[in-house]
Image (cartoon, coloured by chain):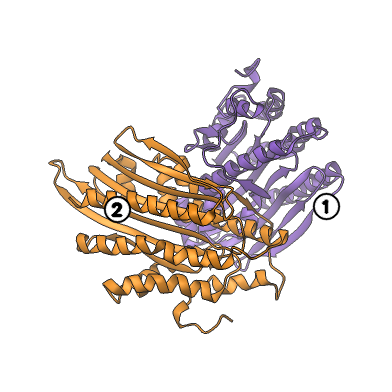
Chain colours: A purple, B orange
Amino acid sequence: MIKEKVQTYFEGLQSRITTALEVFDGKAKFIEDAWVRAEGGGGNTRIITNGDVFEKGGVAFSAVHGRLPEKMATKMNVAASNFFATGVSLVLHPQSPMIPTVHCNYRYFEQYDSDGTLTQQWFGGGADLTPYYPTLEDAQHFHRIHKTVCDRFDPTFYPKYKAQCDAYFYLPHRNETRGIGGIFFDYVRDAPGQTFEFVKACGDAFLDAYLPIAERHRGESYTEPEKNFQRVRRGRYVEFNLVYDRGTTFGLETNGRTESILMSLPPEAAWVYNFTPEAGSRESELSKFLKPHDWLELQGIV
Amino acid sequence: MIKEKVQTYFEGLQSRITTALEVFDGKAKFIEDAWVRAEGGGGNTRIITNGDVFEKGGVAFSAVHGRLPEKMATKMNVAASNFFATGVSLVLHPQSPMIPTVHCNYRYFEQYDSDGTLTQQWFGGGADLTPYYPTLEDAQHFHRIHKTVCDRFDPTFYPKYKAQCDAYFYLPHRNETRGIGGIFFDYVRDAPGQTFEFVKACGDAFLDAYLPIAERHRGESYTEPEKNFQRVRRGRYVEFNLVYDRGTTFGLETNGRTESILMSLPPEAAWVYNFTPEAGSRESELSKFLKPHDWLELQGIV
């Protein structure tokens, strides 16, 4: 059965990622919060705080099943029925504003008719990077790793999923993307066996996509005004997650596990009325990166 | 015409409130950001920051008109048509966690048919208080002032609008109210002249409802952990405004003026995974207040 294999893969991925992040951080360890869902299944949410690199991070695994709640079925535009869902989801908020925040999430969903026959199954997921003091090199590294994975399966995947990422992680009220993007796909119903291989390859690429970027910047010093800039920008992260992110709003509206859903929020955020970086400052450079660029074609950002 | 009178009243109310708040603060002054709406009308948003009492506060006035945007009409479940809307709206975030955050908003809306004939008009508004270290005395004062105003017009107003406030300022995913409530009403279409008198009485009561509470606590000292508790609780304020507040989500979805809409967000907020105050601490008392209580009947909180 594919669902057991997917669940086992996600559980293993969570462990490999948290182990590697602890080694990388060198100071803080993840705390595990295991939970059981009354209606079926459960999960464990691992949280790291006050690390040398990570100010706050969460890496969550869950596998839940039972009767699809009415409210959830309506939202998903499907009939209420039995379901199974498993996924791994992470957000890392580094201490240093020089290191980007990163998010990734891979998930699998099954639905059954009243006889228990599988009627629908799909994968979804993606990864995206949110720098505060961005560099083209970082953006290109993150995209190159994901493009390489995509190209191993289908040359149409990277352009399609990169464009979907730009469209999804977008704040219309700020007219800017959340960060420099990555890949995003959802409701992929075709060829589940092959799609599972693709999702595994994406999950396995996460550490390669992110850690070299974090490593490159972890030794850089930063000032209190730069930390404050990070807080203001984290406010935009909060705005995206609470106003637009489907996983978050869907989870909150369907009585999901609040702490696991909101583990993505930053440790601190700030809002300054009409915040505008000084012209020519490093902070003013960021807006040039918050647009859908063909990163791998760019020679520079103007 | 009532609309000119309402607009003039709101404009005057904004000025009386900002003047009184500046005197009360004693240190900071409001900065005015006046803006013009391309499609008709405009407003001015006044912001106070880094005051002796107020860490960040906004008091906004607007009067806009023109063709109701399609998206807005759909949201409001009315036909697209010409409209006029005016309102005053404020949120004050004090420096001290001992002083509650406060919000109030009063608004008036008119809609016309293609001949310019008035087809609909309504008032809405309310005021609510969000303490961090609450006292029953504060809650009772805030409610007593509003009940007195309501009772002058109709003895059914206070119980009805108080209950609507509790229902509206509620975070289902936290199972708590935003604060200790106040009053809230919307789409009041009856007797516009009389309702305008009621709205004026409510607006005029704001300073009496809030300043004595702020005055009572402004001299109290507080510790850094208490300030941190305020930051975490301000996170809940952000959650309410971005996830549930109709004014905010409606404004963002209909291309409203982002900075004016988001002036309600606190200067700083924090998120701590699974934050739970120590049993018996003053912080643990707050949850007892975040339920719909009949404040004016209570002898104490248990």
Give the amino acid type for the residue marked by disc 1 in the picture: Lys
Residue A6, position in %: x, y? Answer: 69, 48
Closest to the camera, between mark 2 and mark 1, is: 2
User: Which is more toward the observer, B257 or A172?
Assistant: B257
When the figure is inspected, residue B215 is found, relative to residue B7, above or below; the finding is below
Residue B71, position in %: x, y? Answer: 34, 42
| Whole-number angstrom distance, CA of label 2 to CA of label 1 | 58 Å
Which label belongs to residue A29?
1
Residue B195 is at least partly visible in this image: yes
Residue A164, position in %: x, y? Answer: 54, 33
Side of A254 relative to B271 (left or right): left
Side of A72 relative to A55 (left or right): left
Q: Chain of mark 1?
A: A
Q: Locate the C terminus of chain A by quadrant.
A: top right
When the figure is inspected, residue B169 is found, relative to residue A13, above or below; the finding is below
User: Which is more toward the observer, A144 or B267?
Assistant: B267
When the figure is inspected, residue A111 is found, relative to residue A180, above or below; the finding is below
Q: Which residue is mark 2?
A: B9
Q: Label 1 neighbourhood size at 10 Å, few (<14), some (14-19), many (20+)?
A: some
- In this rendering, the count of numbered labels is 2
Secondary structure beneath label 2? helix
User: Which is more toward the observer, A216 or A20?
Assistant: A216
